[in-house]
Each structure stands twice: as C-alpha cells, then as structure tokens.
C-alpha cells in the first residue's frame, strides 16, 4: 500500500475547514505543514502559494515553500518522477509572479531540517507572552451603535455594576459569540471589550491549539483556559469558532476533531461554573456551522451580529488607514457615501491601493505626491465589495434554518439593507 493510500482523519477535517474558511492563513498553513510531514509536498506547495498570495511575506509560508521545493527537487523516495512533479512545483511562480527563488534564498539559512519528527509545542503553563493589554476603547470604534449597545446590555453593563447583578441574580458568565461577514472588525471589538473592563486579552487562533499528535490539541485547549484563569480578569477570545468547534454531526466517526470539540465544550463549562473573571468571546463568519452544543447556556449562549460598517464607521476606518500617510483634500464623508456595502477589510485595501497609486507617481516624478480623492476613486473603482457571497449564504440560513429565532437580528438587518 502506497504512502498516500490512507487519508489521515485530521488532514481530511483540516482540508474541509480550509474549504469553509479559505481566507484563514493560519489554518491553511497548518494543513500545509501536515501535508509536508506526510511527504505530500506538491499539495503542501499549493497551499503555500495560496497563503503567499494573501500575505507575500509570511515567514511560515516562506519556510514551508523552501522545504517543499527542496524536497520536490531532490527527493528520491517519492513514487512520482521528478519530471512529473516539476510543473506543479513551478506553478506558483507562473500563477502570481512572486519571486520564489529570492524568497527561498532569504529563508534558506533559517530553515530547520525538513524531516525531523518532533512533537509540536503546546502552550506551557508559564507562557504568558500571548497575553496582551489592549489600549483600544469602544469610543475608538467608529459607528456601530447597535453593536455597542448590545455589548453594554449583555456584558459590559453587568460587569460594571456588580451590585445590580447581585440584586437581580444575573451573571456575566457564559460566552459571547460575535458573528457576521469577514473583515468587519470582530477582533477589534473584542480587544475594545477587554480594555473597557481592564482585563487581559488572550487571542487564540485555531493553529495555536490544533496539532497533529494525539492528545496535544486537547492539552493545548486546557492550557489556554488555565492561563486565562490564572491571569483573570481576562478576555479569552477564540477566532474562527466554526473551524475549531465545527458540528460534530458533520465530522466522521473516527475523526480526532470530535475529541477536540468535546474538550472545548468541557472547558467552556468549567470556565463558566467555577471561575470568575474569565470572559469568553468568540468570532465566526459561519455561526450556522458551529456545533449546537457550543451555544447552550453557559457556553456561547449570546450572539451579536457585527454587520458591514455604517457611514460613520467607514469614515473612521479610512481615516485610520490614511492617518500616517501624506494626504491632501480627502473628503471622508464623500468616501463613506461612495463605499456603502464595503467591509472594513475592503476599505483598508482601497486605502492601500490608493497609496500605491500616489507612490508610483512619486517614484516617476522624484517628488512626494500626497494621496488624493482621485486616487481613492481610482482604487474604489477597481475593488468591489467582498461580502456578497456571505450575504447570499446568510439569506438562505434566515429563510430556511431560523426556526428557533437565532438569526432574527440578522433577518432584520437583511430587511433593512434590502438583501431580501
């Protein structure tokens, strides 16, 4: 039986997660690393290419790139002939024009040996460098009045008024799930929440806790919660909850991912029943893919919809991304009015593209030319809103899978925005 005949369950589930969340670079690179460990270098290289298209300087992607390229060029134990593998290995350069050879040279001196089989590190008990103190306040988040009001009612208000909580016998325990289209500031909001209550901020990505070795993922999840408890008050923020806590009914019976979901559920229960000062927040673009057990009382039992930025927020986002750049005559109100339907990430892309246009002119003329409204207009004409496919899916969920009213807030938003 060949080395590729048996599909690793973790690789299979990770590949499915990448299909669901193609923009999560950490998840894609974690899959690429596992594929490389299995000797599937051509497949790993494809994922490295996709990651570098999104983030050309990503050191992990560059490291994997060099490793896979070297293996494809020099390995003698692969079943395929080198001539058959060469076109696939060269495909990324042809696809996006990235200078792969120079990138390989840059990382060649720092790459570890390709085939050392060592277990990955998990979060150690004394590893507190992942904890942060955020300086972002909710007042720094432009617009989004509905989101701020819901945060005040469901979390911040009770925390600031412990006597009222005691009188009304309510608790700020349990988890809060922020959901909505990608690139709309869910992480930014979570950081602002931690700052508002004077708590540490502990951001957890799926690549931080998901490992290939049996039991390491579960140990990492336990370590994450233990660190948060020792450093309370702490906002424990999970990115891409749908990828980590995917519906167990959609996972194969032998999948190691089922035990990971179970471990997360156990820790969520423990955090809400025995700990004070640990506030669990999560973010997801696909709440409908989250295991229903994750949303039971005491877990992620409250959801807040974070939609596209309103006009005030769009102006604030553009101001933020242009604040340290030479600009002239930028009319923020005009920019906001012409970018309705754009996400925060789309607006950042517009600002970056407009800056590149001004910089290109400056390089040709030899004089610094500020970014102008003409540059903003040219960039916005080339960049279209990216959230359309998300809202198509959301509309179907509201129409056919909202029997319990979980997405009533989303339904109201869609009606206001005339998405249905």
Image (cartoon, helix red, strand yellow):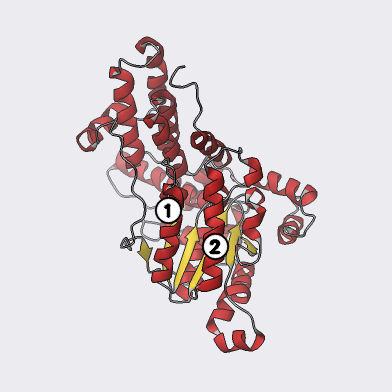
Residue where numbered disc 1 is placed: 219
Please indicate whether residue 37 sits to the left or right of residue 300 in the image. Answer: left
Quick one: which residue is furthest to the left in this view?
109
Distance of mark 2 from mark 1, alpha carbons?
14 Å
> How many badges with numbers are in the image?
2
Label 2 crowding class (10 Å Cα cut-off): few <14, some 14-19, many 20+? some
| Along the line of sight, the residue nearer the viewer: 355 or 266 | 266
Vertical comparison of 144 with 24: above or below? below
Place residue 204 in its image quadrant.
bottom left
Give how far across and how far down residue 29 sits, in percent.
42, 39
Vertical comparison of 31 with 74: above or below? below
Give how far across and how far down residue 377 sits, in percent.
52, 47
Q: In this rendering, does residue 279 appear at all?
A: yes
Place residue 57 in its image quadrant.
top left
Place residue 159 in its image quadrant.
bottom right
Q: Residue at x 54, y 46 (%)?
A: 380
Label 1 crowding class (10 Å Cα cut-off): few <14, some 14-19, many 20+? some
Which of the two marks, 2 or 1, is nearer to us in this view?
1
Q: Residue at x 52, y 49 (%)?
A: 260
Q: In this rendering, does residue 315 appear at all?
A: no
Q: Residue at x 51, y 38 (%)?
A: 14
| Along the line of sight, the residue nearer the viewer: 101 or 4 | 4
Please indicate whether residue 194 sits to the left or right of residue 394 in the image. Answer: left
Give how far across and how far down residue 111 sits, in percent.
25, 36
Helix, strand or loop status at disc 2: helix
Give how far across and how far down residue 46 sits, in percent.
44, 28
In contact (CB < 8 Å): disc 2 and disc 1 = no
Can you tell which mark lies on residue 268?
Answer: 2
Vertical comparison of 318 with 391: above or below? below
Helix, strand or loop status at disc 1: helix
Can you tell which mark lies on residue 174?
Answer: none
Whichever of callouts 2 and 1 sits on the residue coming sooner in the sequence is 1
């Amino acid at each position: 039986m060949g080395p590729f005949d048996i599909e690793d369950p973790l690789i299979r589930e990770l590949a499915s997660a990448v299909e669901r969340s193609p923009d999560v670079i950490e998840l894609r690179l974690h899959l690429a690393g596992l594929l490389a460990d299995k000797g599937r270098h051509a497949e790993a290289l494809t994922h490295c290419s996709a990651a570098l298209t999104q983030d050309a300087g990503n050191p992990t992607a560059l490291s994997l790139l060099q490793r896979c390229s070297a293996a494809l060029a020099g390995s003698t134990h692969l079943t395929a002939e080198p001539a058959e593998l060469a076109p696939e290995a060269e495909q990324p350069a042809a696809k996006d024009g990235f200078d792969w050879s120079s990138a390989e040279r840059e990382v060649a001196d720092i790459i570890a040996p390709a085939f050392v089989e060592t277990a990955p590190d998990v979060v150690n008990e004394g590893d507190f460098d992942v904890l942060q103190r955020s300086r972002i306040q909710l007042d720094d988040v432009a617009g989004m009045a509905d989101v701020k009001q819901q945060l005040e009612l469901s979390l911040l208000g009770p925390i600031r008024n412990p006597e009222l909580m005691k009188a009304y016998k309510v608790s700020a325990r349990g988890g809060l799930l922020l959901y909505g289209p990608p690139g709309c500031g869910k992480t930014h909001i979570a950081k602002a929440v931690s700052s508002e209550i004077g708590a540490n901020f502990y951001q957890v990505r799926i690549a931080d806790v998901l490992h290939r070795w049996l039991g390491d993922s579960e140990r990492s999840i336990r370590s994450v919660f233990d660190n948060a408890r020792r450093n309370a008050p702490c906002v424990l923020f999970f990115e891409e909850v749908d990828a980590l806590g995917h519906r167990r009914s959609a996972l194969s019976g032998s999948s190691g991912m089922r035990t990971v979901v179970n471990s997360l559920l156990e820790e969520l229960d423990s955090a809400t029943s025995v700990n004070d000062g640990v506030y669990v927040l999560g973010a997801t673009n696909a709440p409908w893919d989250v295991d229903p057990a994750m949303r039971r009382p005491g877990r992620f039992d409250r959801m807040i919809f974070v939609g596209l930025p309103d006009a005030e927020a769009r102006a604030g986002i553009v101001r933020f991304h242009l604040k340290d750049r030479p600009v002239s005559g930028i009319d923020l109100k005009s920019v906001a009015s012409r970018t309705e339907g754009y996400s925060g990430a789309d607006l950042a892309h517009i600002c970056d593209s407009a800056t590149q246009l001004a910089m290109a002119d400056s390089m040709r003329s030899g004089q610094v030319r500020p970014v102008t409204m003409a540059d903003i207009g040219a960039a916005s004409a080339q960049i279209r809103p990216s959230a359309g496919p998300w809202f198509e899916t959301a509309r179907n969920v509201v129409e056919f899978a909202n029997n319990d009213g979980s997405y009533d807030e989303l339904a109201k938003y869609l009606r206001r925005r005339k998405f249905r």
